[in-house]
Amino acid sequence: MQKAAGALDGVRVLDFTGVIAGPFGTRLMADLGAEVVKVEPPIGDLLRGAPPRRGGRSPYFGQINCGKKSISVDLKHPKSKSLILSLVKKSDVVVQNFRPGVMAGLGLAYSDLRKHKADLIYCSISGYGQEGPSSHRPAFAPIIHAASGYDLAIMSYQDNLDKPLNGANATADYLAASLAMGAISAALLKREKTGQGDEIDIAMTEVIQNILAYEIQELQFKAERQRPNYGPVRTKDGYIIVNPISPNNFKDLALAVGHPEWLDEFPLNTTDRLKNWTRLMNELEKWTVQHTSLEAEKIIQDGGCPCSRYRDVWDSMHDAQVEARRGVVEIDDGAGPYLIPNTPVRLMNSEAEPKRFVPALGADNAAVLQQWLGLDEAEIKQLSESGVLFEKTEKRRAE
């Protein structure tokens, strides 16, 4: 059955975001059919230069920005503001993740733009929010992980550590971007009902604090038991992780590994059993070390208890379940094709998938200004020659 156009088809997004917090959210919107125009400075998004690189392109950048159009505008140029205001009038959504105050300094804050587009939806993503004593601070995901309590919360579950773990993940960025897409979609629905726009303020610290539900509540109300450490259990050739939380899960585990006596030795009551979690895992490991990770995973899973072996990312991407769901797709940034995960948002009756192309810097200057504003070649050339527009000389694979 042929699917209908994406759920956000017809929505125009003016995207002033860079790196990850913002760009990933607007890419998800592009996956769902929105027309996303990425507004970049003459040097381009910082992520364009990020490794790994081949053929002068960053596939890291491509994964997060595929399906968008790119215009490159010097926002500090005195003639750029009128151009941006003209584009805003043709937009449904503006998204930005500059440090608070930057857009206001350019005359592009929500209070400025709503005068030109009353029903505009304006989303700001920042480390600490748009107001407050810390709002001005610069932040990337690792800073937010430290500032929000996330890193020390993770450390509290580790043994024999005297400092937080090293890490390069961008959890705060991806979560903030995903919530931005959800908030924007909600604002679009509200606008459909009321005709009113809205301003959205997303602080990455608050995003992370919202995933620390147990830790925040345990600090206020001392728990009767310690939350179990869901950690690795050693096998003959690696590690697995098991999660026998409910009484039925525990029963399934005990029977699967041939130890029905555990049902008498360890309480079926979940709270009491979790008090003996470490001892249970030690007993389980006496069995798992006699099996490979794959063997142990299959036996325990087939028995009905949640279990997985530890896998690297490449192995996970090529899992039969992922392949069955088309969980990996191919895009091309002009330097050649490569794989990225399919969009995690699936709609059964409308298109929801990453677009195959990746925009070169400023590659869509002319097309966007012609289609959105009706400018002719001479007017666009004048903007380029005056330094308002910039286009890098490189090719983009055809859509």
Image (spheres, rainbow, N blue to C red):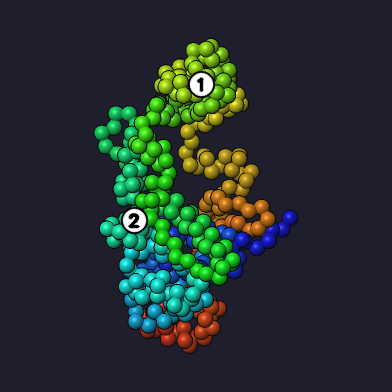
Image quadrant holding the N terminus, namely: bottom right
**Residue at horizontal 47%, vertical 38%?**
312
The residue nearer to you, when weighing 67 against 192, is 192
Circle 2 — which element?
A: loop
The residue nearer to you, when weighing 315 against 191, is 191
Which is more N-terminal, label 2 or label 1?
2
Circle 1 — which element?
A: loop
**Mark 2 — residue?**
128
Q: Is residue 191 above or below residue 343?
A: below
Q: Is residue 259 above or below residue 146?
A: above
**Residue at horizontal 72%, vertical 58%?**
2
Task: Kindly identify the amino acid type of the residue bearing the numbered disc 2.
Answer: Tyr
Image quadrant holding the C terminus, namely: bottom right
**Mark 1 — residue?**
269
Q: Is residue 302 above or below residue 349?
A: above
The residue nearer to you, when weighing 298 against 14, is 14
**Residue at horizontal 39%, vertical 38%?**
217
Measured as percent of width and height from the top left, residue 56 is found at 42, 62
Q: Is residue 344 above or below residue 295?
A: below
The residue at the far bottom in this view is 378
